[in-house]
Image (spheres, coloured by chain):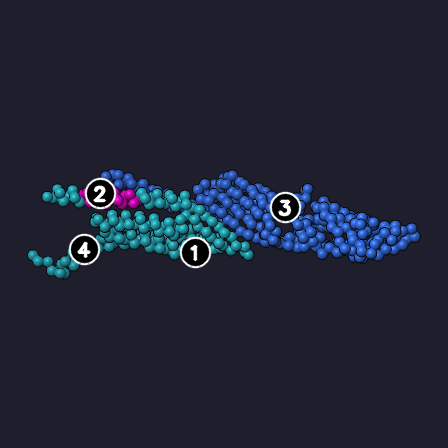
Amino acid sequence: MRQALRALGWATKILWILIIVFAATIVYSALPMNFRMGFGEPQAAFSDGVIVMSFPLIINNSGYYPVSDLNLTTSLMDDEGNLVSTSTTFVPLIARSSNLEKSHNVSLSLNDLNLTRFLFEDSDFTADLSIAMKFARVVPLQVATEMAIPWGAPLYNFSVGEMTPQFNGTHYLGAVPISFENHSPFLNVTGAIRFEILNDEGEPVVSGEKIVDVPSHSGYGGQVELIVDDLAKITANRQARVSFETSMFNFRMVIPYG
Amino acid sequence: MVKTAEDKRDGLLKKLAPRILKAAFWGFLTFLMYYIPYQLLVLPMLMFPEFFSFEIQPIFYNFVALAVFFAVAINFFSGTILQHVLGVARALILMTYLIYALNGGILTLNPNVGTETFTILVDFRAFLMMIILVSLLSLAKSILQTINFLASEKESSLSQE
């Protein structure tokens, strides 16, 4: 009995020491000086109506234990709380004393957005960021935060001025002033703006096109030139159709005009 | 020869003094055993106060107070049945206190970094399970020690008869 008790005593002491050492080294390994995680400079790419924002995820694990099952999830919601995008990046293992860089891609389909609002009005997106991982394969840890991401409208304050027709001897030339501000941090408005004046039946009677190249965070002010062969075609209750055909998005709207 | 009250007191003091010294020594050693690793952990925590809530301090101090109390009491009553009974009580109380204080192994922190509020959830139930298993081992040892103590007491009384 005495021998068994002595063995049990030693076993307990050794196990306590192991647990204390294990706990201390896990906490030490998880401290920000030993486990760093951050995002690099984001990059934006655009194709087929989808903006892909790529956030380089940089992880430096200089602790004593590997970090496994790292799961980064981003959910993007518009200002009305509608979910517009969910992205997940999974890293199965980050070995101890190692660095890792992986892109976390957040896709935003313009087709899923209410384009009328997001092209013309500044807004705020809400991003729910959640990172889950396992320290030393036994201690799961989850970090979550919610942050506001301002959305800059690429056609903010879009306005169309009055047409001033001038007769040049054979037909009328009209110039329609157009202006807007590109508030978007990612999107360049590069493409054509087509302006058509519609008659009562909704058919275009006069049209013109302007090629624009407006980088992000800059304003635009220009004129679309129209050739009007017969002023009589332009009715009193006019409407105009404005079409944007850019590398980033295609959008068309009808506005009262005149 | 009749013992005077003074002689009795001297005898008691002679008996108690080594016990008190032993209890004090083990109490101090127990305190150091918990306090030094804690201080080593506190240093990096002080460097990142936004991540580590100091609500953990009272939990730790209560735990150390319990551990020191039991270390002193067990050593003071060493060689008696109380030593083993206190050993059983220590294993049970510290185990229950750890489960209660560590919220069943799920810890939630809400640090503010800049303007953002983070929610950090640490699930160390597996780790708590290890602590409970070792505590159960301590409990088993204390129970066996109690049985062993009672058996040897009985044995010595029988051999005296």
Horizontal arrangement in the rendering, residue A248 relative to residue B43 (left or right): right
Q: Earlier in the sequence, mark 2 or mark 4?
A: 4
Any magenta on residue B150?
yes
Q: What is the spatial separation of the Cα atoms under label 2 and label 4, in whole angstroms?
A: 28 Å
For chain A, the rendered hue is: blue
Amino acid at pointer 4: Lys
Quarter of the image holding residue A111? Answer: top right
- State if disc 2 and disc 1 touch (CB < 8 Å): no
Q: Secondary structure at mark 3?
A: strand
Q: Which residues are magenta?
A: B138-152
Determine the image quadrant of residue A238.
bottom right
Task: Tell if the residue under mark 4 belongs to the same chain as the one under mark 1.
Answer: yes
Chain under callout 1 = B
Residue at which label 4 appears: B14
Q: Name the front one of labels 2 and 4.
A: 2
Amino acid tagged 1: Phe
Residue at mark 3: A108
- Amino acid identity at mark 2: Asn
Badge 3, how many Cα within 10 Å: few under 14, some, many 20+? some
**Horizontal and vertical percent position of residue A257:** 78, 55
